[in-house]
Amino acid sequence: MAFDSTIDGTASVRPGLSRVIIAATIATALEIFDFVVYGFFAVTIAEVFFPASNPTVSLLVTFGTFGLGYVARPLGAVIIGTYSDRAGRKAGLTLSIGLMLIGTTLMVITPSYATIGIAAPIIITIARLLQGFSMGGEFGSAVVFLAEHGGERRGFSASWQWASVGIVSVIVSLFGVTLTTQLSHEQLIDWGWRIPYVFGLLVGPAGLYIRSHIDETPDFLKAERSQKVSISDLLRRHPVPLLLALGATIVSASSYYLLLYIPTYGIKTLHLPAYAGFLATLVGGIILGTFSVVAGHRSDKTVPRTRIMLITAWLFLLAAYPCFWLMNVYPSVATAVFAVSFLNLIKGGYSGVLPSVVCEQFPVETRAVGVALAFSISITIFGGFAPFVATWLIAQTGDPLSPSYYLMATALLSIIALMAIERRARLVRKSAEVARSVV
């Protein structure tokens, strides 16, 4: 059954909801920031830490390391998610951002391959693993934190998780446009790419302070005296909700990381200037940040959450190929901006509702680990390696449209999961009506 009733909705607006949203999303944005920077500056990082005679091989190794960070996410989801279900959402969130800051520090201070040789890519790989581990617990814990504080407005409250991702895309894109237009290639390689990481490192302590002063969620406090269950209990008692939650997150993960890949796609495949891809993701990030909140807000009103997600998932399936076709047939800054903006509009509608739907699949005792594990497995398999898969598909097939096929396939998987979630919800409602009529 679905567990939407376990998220307390007795009050239409929880006290201090704005403060809760700001506290959760600022710190989450700081953690996501490091991941987005790595994806956006993949071509530059490939030259600095993973040099090879074949540029495609160098880029594949770079994206492989990018994906490796996601391999650690499920482990982080289990450990930090379970910790959040036992010690509290606040404790889990504070732990995750502390670990992320260590990884960011390594990205800032590690010398290039030309300076220290093989030690450079090894340190970068360790940093990616550490960041992946912390993000594994971060995203799920933050989603649960926002949803449980949201009450009847949990769709709106939880939507800010993906809105913060859009905001991060805007900030990193601004860095990308500025650095690629104001610095020479040599300056970008030597030190320019590190500037966004320095920014993240300087803002990081503010995130730690904010997390240490936020309130625990009412739902967790009510369940605090009950026995907290482990990951084995989650897998044994709630395997179907976990599987459906994972399925619902698939296209959200694949679409975001394919859109993160656009700056590289623009440079390597479309042969556009470096700033073009960043400009496209800048506009797309604004749209994602805006429409995520709009969709979350609407899901609290008259439109069922899964209905919104099914419509946008079908739009992903139908629009993926035309968008990539447009960018390839008419390669320009304008078409890249249009295609990325349209896909981000669809993504905002889907991902803005996704967090609250995933939360509703689990009871409070296993919600943090359940949500974290669903997001982490999906992002690891379908998101983190999406740029690698896209680069590999283009290299193997010679078809510059092949990334769209990947997006279409993942959209179909999420459609199947959402249809199953809707069917289970109808069965739960029907069973409840029958029980009431008997009484």
Image: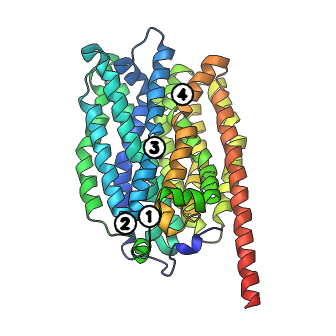
Quarter of the N terminus within the rendering: bottom right
Residue drawn at (38%, 52%) of the image:
28
Q: Viewer-proximal residue, 257 or 340? A: 257
Residue on which disc 3 sits? 73
Residue on which disc 1 sits? 146
Residue drawn at (62%, 59%) of the image:
241
Which mark sits nearer the N-terminus, 4 or 3?
3
Residue 179: x and y, percent?
A: 34, 29
Residue depth check, mark 4 versus mark 3: number of the one nearer the observer:
3
Residue depth check, mark 3 versus mark 2: number of the one nearer the observer:
3
Q: Secondary structure at mark 1?
A: helix
Q: Is residue 88 visible?
A: no
Which mark sits nearer the N-terminus, 2 or 4?
2
Residue on which disc 4 sits? 388
Residue on which disc 2 sits? 20
Say left or right for 202 vs 123. Answer: left
Q: Is residue 410 visible?
A: yes
Residue 95: x and y, percent?
A: 31, 53
**CA separation in Å, label 1 and label 3:** 20 Å
Q: Amino acid at mark 1?
A: Leu
Which mark sits nearer the N-terminus, 1 or 2?
2
